[in-house]
Image (cartoon, helix red, strand yellow):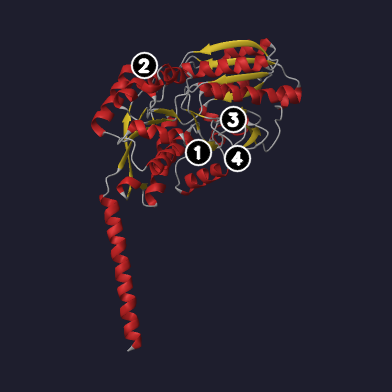
Amino acid sequence: MKNKMFLRCLTAVFLATLGVMFLYSGAFAQAKPIVLGLPSSFFQPLVKSGRLAVELAIDEINGTGGVFVKDEKVKRPLKLVTADTRCGEPGTPVHAALMAVDKMIADEKPDALIIAPFRSEAMVATMDLIAKYKMVTIQTIAQTPKLIEVFQGDPAKYKYWFRATTNSTYVGTTAAKSIDSLRKQFGHDKFFTIAQDTLWAKGSADALKGRLEGLGWKMVGLELAPVGTNDFSPILSKARGSGAQILYVVGDMPTLPVCFKQWKSMKIPTMLFLDFAVVTSNKAWTMYGEDLDYVMVMPFPGGTGAPVKALPQSGYFHAKWAAKKLPGMDDPRVVSSAYDGVYILKDAIERAGFVPSKDPDKFVGFLEKTDMMGVSGRIRFDKATHQQIFDGDPKESSIIVAYQWRAGKMVPIFPDIVAEAKVELAPWMK
């Protein structure tokens, strides 16, 4: 008799628990999703990987029940909608990208935007759409400092925009500090720059020049390469005759690997610091092999291209990427920013108690108070610029990390606080 009573009680508890689970899963399934809009240029490998990073974060969050919206007393799932702005394709006019963003906002009515247009010129133009629709935007690609100028020109109008990644000034400045380690270590003091002829790349080159000259370096050459350049040998010949000890190359066009190959085959007597996509991921070794040895790279922000021991979230991010068997990143730069961007929104929604579209003006205040750990370190925004703060200590801010290729691995070499080795000269430089 006692055994029968026990079995009946156990069955009742099981059925009750199962009922609660069904009710919960049903409520989750019926809960209105929080819609994230992703309007960007899917022609670009960077955007393709960024989308995967966003989907990875969404899957993780939805796997735990979703985002808790306190005012509604419910967890709501995240849903992603996309629009191809095509602004990363050669010849696409800015107004075409704007039309794609406008249509997405009007048709899909997202609660917030993530990533946003790829090309800086298109992103600058999109700022007025963000203001028009009061669309909270976590922008994670476009790097031009011009966006901060636009924001500061009318903060009340553009307050819905936040850049949750680096900008080209940060990138150029950190590249300069990384390069300056060669002066301290080897006595080098002359540099030559090749910059893609676009806003963000020229911004990085300008920041690099100002910073390095302030540290005692001399720029002995600057060449702007039009998008689509497929022969860099004339420029490299100028670099050879300039007396430079370091060659800095910045851009994102698909033909930039030609520059790298020609630098190698011509044995240009410089160290090479590459600020472009195809050599900033672990996948690059399968393409170039030992030719990458000694090349310095900087897949910004820190931890996005390869894990850094001093950035625990970077190890987690890459482990989750591998566990999901996602394709290798052709361009890892700022991909982790897309991933962190989803968590920034989740964090702000849970602190605010409502979704961004309910009260965008009030929601902005919660985003401004963001303080959380991400892949590249501590994530906070400068209230005066709505720019994510990057500095030298990952416990206080996010950071950018420079690596050097060594025998198939990207080894962190700057800043010193996270470095795992010192820079080594290429053999023909010794």
The residue at which mark 2 appears reads as 91
Could you tell me how far apart the alpha carbons at marks 1 and 4 are, in whole angstroms? Answer: 21 Å
- Point out the tag, 2 or 1, that comes first from the N-terminus: 2
Against 184, residue 29 (above or below) is below
Could you tell me how far apart the alpha carbons at marks 2 and 4 are, in whole angstroms? Answer: 38 Å
* Residue in view at x 50 percent, y 17 percent: 230
Could you tell me how far apart the alpha carbons at marks 3 and 2 are, in whole angstroms? Answer: 36 Å
- For residue 308, the mark is 4
Could you tell me how far apart the alpha carbons at marks 4 and 3 are, in whole angstroms? Answer: 16 Å
- Point out the tag, 4 or 3, that comes first from the N-terminus: 4
Taking the image as shown, residue 55 lies to the left or right of residue 304, namely: left
Against 212, residue 392 (above or below) is below
Dot 4 alpha-carbon crowd within 10 angstroms: few under 14, some 14 to 19, many 20 or more:
many
Q: Nearer the viewer, mark 1 or mark 3?
A: 1
Taking the image as shown, residue 288 lies to the left or right of residue 144, namely: right
Q: Nearer the viewer, mark 4 or mark 3?
A: 3
Q: Amino acid at mark 2?
A: Gly
Q: Secondary structure at mark 2?
A: loop
Against 287, residue 184 (above or below) is above
Q: Position of residue 259 (x, y in %)?
A: 56, 20
Q: Secondary structure at mark 3?
A: loop
The residue at which mark 1 appears reads as 371
* Residue in view at x 48 percent, y 44 percent: 321
- Point out the tag, 1 or 4, that comes first from the N-terminus: 4
The residue at which mark 3 appears reads as 391
Q: Nearer the viewer, mark 2 or mark 1?
A: 1
